[in-house]
Image (cartoon, rainbow, N blue to C red):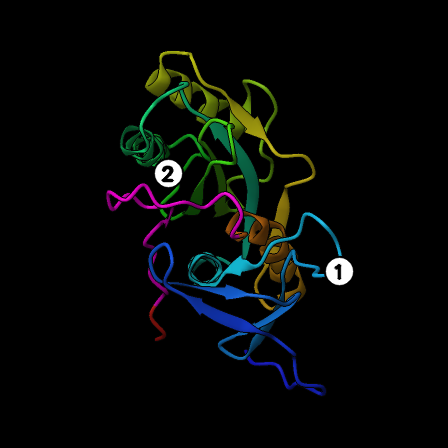
Amino acid sequence: MSVDLLFPVVQKITNHRDDGRYSLIHSSEYVLDGLIYRLNYDSMKKGYHPIRKEIIDAFIKQLQAMQSHYSKIFAFRFDLSVPEGMHVTESNVLVSNLFERLRGRFKKKAWNEQPIKKFAYGWVREKKAANQVHYHCWIALPYFQVQTAGFGNTGMIGLISELWDELTDNISRVHLAENSRYSIVRGDHDSLVDFVERISYLAKNSGKFSSGEGQRIFSTSKLRMKESN
């Protein structure tokens, strides 16, 4: 689906090479593949930072892939703390292992009496000033199997917390972001736009740093678009 632009979207993108190669979006609206998205950016207010193009592009494409497989998906945001002083090499591996363990749990017929066959996710690593490294994450799931994030030790967030406790020896915690649950319906572009705007905060340039050792500052699932018949 494409959108006819009655008024051209004004977007400014700059390219950088100071800490690896990356591009920054300096606008509250962004066009990707002919579709308009809102971003969590406002140059007139303090606390807003330009958005890393490579990150938000990857997030959007994974959400689009989920939409190609399911007419309705459920998505939410959560954050991960890591053991104090842990090197990013180790913490990145922990986060990757979390999603792999989730994939393993999804194989059980525990989700509307079926396994979860496909899901999408994304994460970013951040560190600000003297703060500890932490991770912001999102996950998207088939709505007919998951309609809520759960609470505390229950539901999907409870499962994520259980697995994170196992991986970090009960040292680190999972935080479910407030007002972060979204239902995304195929054919209702606004429902996708709302979630993209929310997770564009994860793609902000602030707090993104290179370890100098080739460690990723973000990653996503590798879900492919459903092939058209």
- The mark lying in front, picked from 1 and 2, is 1
Nearer to us in this view, 73 or 219: 219
Displayed quadrant of residue 166: top left
Residue 167 appears left or right of 29: left
Q: Quadrant of the C terminus?
A: bottom left
Kind of residue at badge 2: Pro
Assess disc 1: are there few (<14), some (14-19) or many (≥20) residues with their C-alpha within 10 Å of its C-alpha: few
Reading the image, the residue beneath label 2 is 115
Nearer to us in this view, 8 or 75: 8
Q: Main secondary structure of the magenta part?
A: loop
Label 2: state its secondary structure: loop
Q: In the rendered structure, which segment of residues is drawn in magenta?
A: 205-226
Magenta-span inclusion, residue 214? yes
Kind of residue at badge 1: Met
Determine the residue located farthest toward the front in the rendered image. Answer: 18
Q: Is the residue 140 above or below the residue 109 in the image?
A: below
Percent position of residue 46, x then y: 72, 50
